[in-house]
Image (cartoon, grey):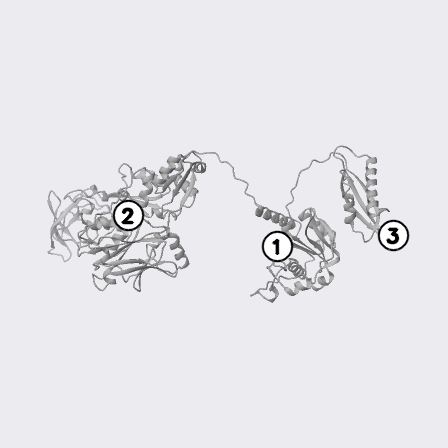
Amino acid sequence: MIISKNWLNEIIDLSNFSTEQICAKLNSIGLEVDSVTNITIPDNIVVGYIKSCVKHENSDHLHVCEVDVGDRVLQIVCGAKNARADIYVAVALVGAVMPNGLEIKEAKLRGVQSSGMLCSSTELGLPKINDGIMILDDSIGELVLGKALNEFDIFDDDIIEIELTPNRGDCLSIYGIARDLSCALDLILRDEKAINEDDRQLGIGRLVSVHCEALINGAFAYRAIEIGEGFKESLKLALRAALIGSQKTTNLERLLECLTHYTGVIFRAYDHGKLASSSDEKIALTIKKLENGAYGIHCGDRLLSIAGISQNDDARVDENSKIAIIEASYIEPNLISEILGNDKDIKKDEFAYRSTRGSEPNLNYAMNILFNIFTKNHNITPYSGTQQVQLSREPIAIGFGSSEISAMIGMTISSTDIARILKKLGFEISATSDNEQIYAKVPLWRHDIVNSHDICEEIVRIIGIDNIPARALEYSEKNRTNESYERYKLSRNIRQKAANLGFFESVHYLFDNPIELKELGVACSSEVLLNPINSELSALKPTLINHLLNAASFNIKNSKRSVKLFEFGDVINKDGIQRAKFGFVFSGLIGEPTLLNGAKPATIDFIHFANLIQNILGKIELRKSNDIEFLSEFEQAKVYQNGDYIGYIGRVNATIEQSRDLFKTYVCEIDFDNLKPIKKLANPYSKFQSLSRDLSIIMPKDMPYIRIKETIEKLEIKSLKEFLPVDIYSDESLGNSVSLSIKFTFQDDSKTLEDEEIVAIMDSILRALKENLGIGLR
């Protein structure tokens, strides 16, 4: 964004501030200054007036001019095509040193004495505005012959280039930056008052009517002018158009582009003569919503422009235009960004960039400035009145407290200071009677402000980050853990433990083979896939086990002798209910053959596999089952944790092992949604020695061990820390009974247990087994 101190000074009074101070303030409020360039016309270059201009006798392209410089008349030979009598020009006197180092001296050109030089804008170090010498006019100030050019403000200026963040579209104009500076420097913006229209002026209603088909996310204003034969842009506007790099070729469009840069409002001009058959014909402009969501400006069936994006050439003004319809528009930037994002090939012009970041919505302010310029030009006749389409959206209101803002900033800011800053930035402020709660209506040009944090950022910008005292960093983040995070952490811990125990994670599709599932005896969901990947993946998987068995088989076929896999994923049961589960499979040897195990590792068994699962999940309880079809009826169990059913475990039956080319294989499937995190509690440990005793009892073969376990647990013996079955024995002499050896571990927290106490406890255990189960010592 290019601005200048002189240009800013037209909106706010910066006479008491140096360029360095202005740049420092711009940086402090977040408008980063990228570069500063000083424009100064050298000494001895003055205002001159060409009294006469005749052709050089010995040249077909040189002219001999008599130039009045106030105190004398000079003869100067000039080669510019636009040199002519009765114009004011910039004259470099003898002795002047040009910006390129050239010193002006007395000279003879083709035999004619020349005492000075008529200068072009580029020869003076200014941007190029035309081909030839620079013609002066009163737009730069009163033209006094002999007055040094560097005494005019426009020729003694500082050009400032600012880098803007994408959200600050409101500062893509001189007016927007002046608005921010007025707040930061506590200055008052100069108002641009509307002109008093002459009752004798023709009204715009004679030329055009504007109709909008529905409510729109934008605003439009239309005015009209009649252009006389001698209309041209002033020197000041020509210099500023060149400064901003305008590529427009017509005087009116260059003027409008300068006004867009100055005010932030997007201007376009349409040639009435190209839309009407005669100068007095009334045309109708219609604003319609296009298929892509943009707003098109139509005249009949002709699309003249797409608001904020582009303008077609067929109704564009040119140097021969007599009557022009001036349009000022504002479209909400989010809509423009969405349209351009969805259609990369849409035609765009130089205003599309401004529209996506937010143009200025104050259309009347910009129109007043433009028509004040027109009224000062004798070759322009404005029409009275304005045709408008108003913006229907209300500004958003944000509520916050001064204590909330102070807490964010880290220093106390009073409600009065907050309100003062925000009012200066264009916010509408209201507050409760005690000033505890403040409500700020966000101005339309700040579409990027949506919450109290954005409000806080605005206040910090104006106060200045350097004016906020530093404080030590405080870690005051609240505990934001929730159930979802706890579930994620539990699943991550289970996966890590499984990987640490040698299991490799496997990932499969959510779809499964219905034929293989039928072989396992697992019912599929009744939901049918309309477009399955293939016939082998045409059902939603109800279990993780089928894919894991296939993966184990694949690894075995690739010469693996020990396969340990697990998977965490969702399954969908026959009723269509989705659940998260963990699946485990262990097939073959406990480990791959190596020198350390003599190349003869043991084969996996139920106890080893169950211990691995317990090391992964924490303490579990197994209860015998026989209702899972694809597991061996002799080696399967249901898995419980803290009394809740969480899954099953067992060996795959021999038929399936053979059909899948598997070794001896064990699987386990756990319902993750039934798992609960196990909180580890630190308990004091006993400093006294533990004692153990073995007990061998005779029990029926068909009696489950769980009955013995429950009987002993009901005794609630505090000193009994643990009891586990360690051996089972049977022979013909025992008939339908077996001998079960159980190891008991005792420890007291307050003393060393005596043998008599252990004996008494063992007697009470035997007595309970005898009375409740009818079993006793071997």
Residue at disc 1, secondary structure = strand
Local crowd size for mark 1, using a 10 Å CA cut-off: few (<14), some (14–19), many (≥20): some
Among all residues in the image, which is located at the extreme right? Answer: 733
Neighbourhood count class around disc 2 (C-alpha, 10 Å): few under 14, some 14–19, many 20 upward: some
Which is in the foreground here, disc 2 or disc 3?
Answer: 2
- Residue with the mark numbered 2: 365
Residue 524 lies in quadrant: bottom right
Q: Earlier in the sequence, mark 2 or mark 3?
A: 2
Residue 754 located left or right of residue 560: right
Kindly identify which numbered label has been placed on residue 429: none
Q: Which mark is residue 734?
A: 3
Which badge, 2 or 1, comes first in the chain's sequence? 2
Q: Amino acid at mark 1?
A: Arg
| Amino acid bearing label 3 | Leu
Q: Pinpoint residue 173: horizontal percent, then vertical percent.
A: 31, 47
Q: Residue at x 41, y 40 (%)?
A: 456
The answer to which quarter of the image holds residue 662 is: bottom right
Answer yes or no: is residue 121 visible: no
The residue that mark 1 highlights is: 579
